[in-house]
Image (cartoon, rainbow, N blue to C red):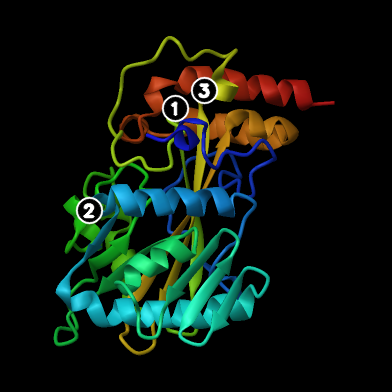
Amino acid sequence: MSSMTTEILGTKTAPPAYLPFEGGRYRMAMGLQSLKLDDWIEIGPDREEQLIERQRLLQVQREEVLAILPEAEEASAELLEVLADFLPRRFPELYRRQGPRLESLTPKGSWQVAPPEAHPLLIAGHLVQEDLCLMQKDPKDEEAPYRLTAAVLCFPNRWLLAEKMGEPMLAIHDPVPAYGEKLGRPVDRFLSLLKADKPVWRVNWSLSDDPALFQPRGHGRGEMDPSITRENAGKRVFLRCERQTLLRLPRSQAIVFGIRTHLHPLSALEARPEAALELAAVLRSIPEEMARYKSLLVFREAAIAYLEGLAAAGTP
């Protein structure tokens, strides 16, 4: 692993942009909100370092982060077309279209996109911070579920792309406690009804003692790590938030599932004592089975003590 990755790539000491644990109670819900088309792709202060890391992963670990089934070729090409039009129009200070080529001004990069000089999804993976997954269904079967048919997944949060390819949402989330019971049907129904001009977004969160962005394993750890304490949890435990978007491509009708990862040490909540207290309450209320699945038991008590200490110190 490169030194860039071991130096906690992408973590920020500023308060997190997303704090999806308001109310202080754990609940499993879709939590979808309407998304303006102009807000589909998100640009952050960690853009350059994340794009450099994506470039490294796509070069040295391509088989682990890029996968395409034959039925996804048309949708992959359409996705690159949409990005090549969207990025220079929405972010002219960062992207420039020069005939058949699309340029990134920082970090420097140039790709032929018309026609693509490489696989469209490979190029797309270099362009934005988002991981991009394509979901498709059999157009001849209205009852068929959406399946994962292609993805550039550089920053997985404890899932292996190779194990999920070709699977429907229910199978992809099979290890998640209560997913099938609570969210299986609502998610499948929503995907079927999603309109091309009405994208949506949500935020998913987790905690981890591993600051790596590329994190394909790690679920189900249950043994407490005594080296993580109230005193050092602010630097040893990380809040990982995913801004997840769903956008339907108009021509292929494929759904683009975008995942933009934000990573912060818990110490970033020093400026938000009320959020620290809410997160501590969520950690207390989360069901044991879910806590084990998310590997929270490794550091939960230390994290709660640290967060409650932040809240107490920040209360007038």
Q: Is residue 281 above or below residue 37?
A: above
Q: Is residue 239 above or below residue 196?
A: above
Amino acid marked by disc 1: Asp
Residue at the extreme right of the image, as rendered = 316
Q: Secondary structure at mark 3?
A: helix
Say which label, 3 or 1, has the lower sequence index: 1
Badges 3 and 1: C-beta atoms under 8 Å apart?
yes
- Name the quadrant containing residue 230: top right
> Residue at the location (71% across, 32% down)?
273
> Distance of mark 2 from mark 3, alpha carbons?
30 Å
Q: Position of residue 7 (x, y in %)?
A: 52, 31
Label for residue 63?
2
> Residue at the location (45% across, 48% down)?
53
Residue 37 can be seen in this image: no
- Name the quadrant containing residue 291: top left
> Distance of mark 3 from mark 1, alpha carbons?
6 Å
Q: Give the quadrant of the C terminus.
A: top right
> Residue at the location (18% across, 77% down)?
71
Say which label, 2 or 3, has the lower sequence index: 2
Q: Residues within 10 Å of mark 1 (few under 14, many from 20)?
A: some
Q: Position of residue 33 (x, y in %)?
A: 54, 67
Q: Is residue 202 above or below residue 99?
A: above
Amino acid marked by disc 3: Arg
* Number of the front mark, 1 or 2: 2
Q: Which residue is mark 3?
A: 236
> Distance of mark 1 from mark 2, alpha carbons?
26 Å
Amino acid marked by disc 2: Glu
Q: Which residue is mark 1?
A: 209
